[in-house]
């Protein structure tokens, strides 16, 4: 495996996603891209923890930094349609390119914040709806809320708002689950990840029970064969 300026070849090759960046999927795209850059050891160039060497630094050090920054920008380009490259084509570093994409696809305006909160808080699932799909949709909408800055992962009441809104979005048949969760003494259950996991597990259990009941009912309705006994 060859190296260039101390970088392994796998650090230079971008990871390509099936879904490219566009309006409506920035939250998912940015999460995937962040993980891809972390796996390459390049995320520090984006979040600002790794800055360019001083002007008087040795040439090799500056050259390595420029190559790593170019590799990180290539990761962005590999997962963005050509029609959106103009958004950051003049950005001199990957950090500025990332911020330009954020501003274009997820601007933190008051309108965006209120729209994201309204979409999240108004979503409901009917009695005959797909609870699993609904929970995953709510999780995606919550990520949109976080991206607009209406709440942040560090907000003290963020998880509580997410949990209460998610529970209120369930149909009446889930009232026993909701009541049990709200009365649970374990404070750790207030986390968003915990409620999503428990809801998905409970939905899978409900589906399994319904399937078992359907099979039993089908077996009971099956006519028994009769034998004719001749003397």
Image: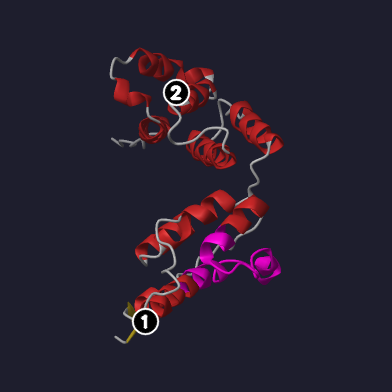
**Colour mapping:** secondary structure
Q: How crowded is mark 1: few (under 14 residues within 10 Å), some or many (20 or more)?
A: few
Give the prevailing secondary structure in the magenta stretch: helix
Which residue appears at 47% of the width and 28% of the height? 158
Name above or below for residue 100 compared with residue 65.
above
Is residue 17 toward the left or the right of residue 118 in the image?
A: left
Q: Residues within 10 Å of mark 2 (few under 14, many from 20)?
A: some
How far is disc 1 from disc 2 in space, using C-alphas?
A: 50 Å
User: Residue 222, can we see it?
Assistant: no
Is residue 40 toward the left or the right of residue 20 in the image?
A: left
Name above or below for residue 61 compared with residue 42.
below
Q: Position of residue 191 (x, y in %)?
A: 37, 29
The residue to which callout 2 is attached is 160
Magenta residues span 71-98
Q: In which quarter of the image is the C terminus?
A: top left
Which is nearer the N-term, disc 1 or disc 2? Answer: 1
**In what element is the residue under mark 2?**
helix
Q: Quadrant of the N terminus?
A: bottom left
Q: Which mark is residue 46?
A: none
Viewer-nearest residue: 150 or 145: 150
Which residue appears at 56% of the width and 29% of the height? 128
User: Residue 126, can we see it?
Assistant: yes
Which residue appears at 32% of the width and 79% of the height? 8
Name above or below for residue 95 compared with residue 142.
below
Q: Where is residue 227 in the image (x, y as percent from the top left)?
A: 33, 37
The residue to which callout 1 is attached is 60
In magenta segment, residue 58: no
């Amino acid at each position: 495996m060859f190296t260039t300026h101390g970088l392994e070849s796998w650090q230079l090759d971008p990871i390509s996603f099936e879904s490219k960046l566009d309006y409506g999927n920035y939250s998912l795209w940015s999460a995937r891209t962040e993980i891809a850059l972390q796996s390459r050891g390049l995320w520090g160039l984006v979040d600002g923890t790794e800055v360019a060497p001083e002007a008087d630094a040795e040439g090799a050090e500056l050259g390595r930094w420029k190559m790593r920054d170019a590799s990180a920008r290539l990761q962005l380009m590999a997962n963005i349609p050509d029609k959106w490259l103009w958004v950051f084509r003049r950005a001199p570093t990957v950090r500025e390119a990332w911020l330009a994409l954020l501003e274009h696809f997820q601007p933190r305006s008051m309108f965006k914040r209120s729209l994201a909160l309204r979409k999240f808080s108004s979503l409901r699932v009917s009695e005959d709806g797909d609870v699993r799909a609904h929970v995953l949709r709510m999780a995606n909408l919550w990520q949109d809320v976080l991206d607009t800055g209406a709440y942040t992962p560090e907000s003290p009441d963020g998880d509580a708002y997410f949990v209460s809104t998610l529970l209120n979005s369930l149909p009446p048949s889930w009232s026993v689950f909701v009541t049990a969760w709200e009365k649970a003494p374990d404070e750790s259950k207030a986390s968003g990840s915990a409620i999503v996991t428990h809801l998905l597990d409970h939905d899978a259990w409900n589906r399994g029970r319904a399937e078992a009941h359907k099979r039993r009912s089908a077996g009971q309705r099956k006519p028994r064969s009769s034998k004719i006994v001749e003397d």
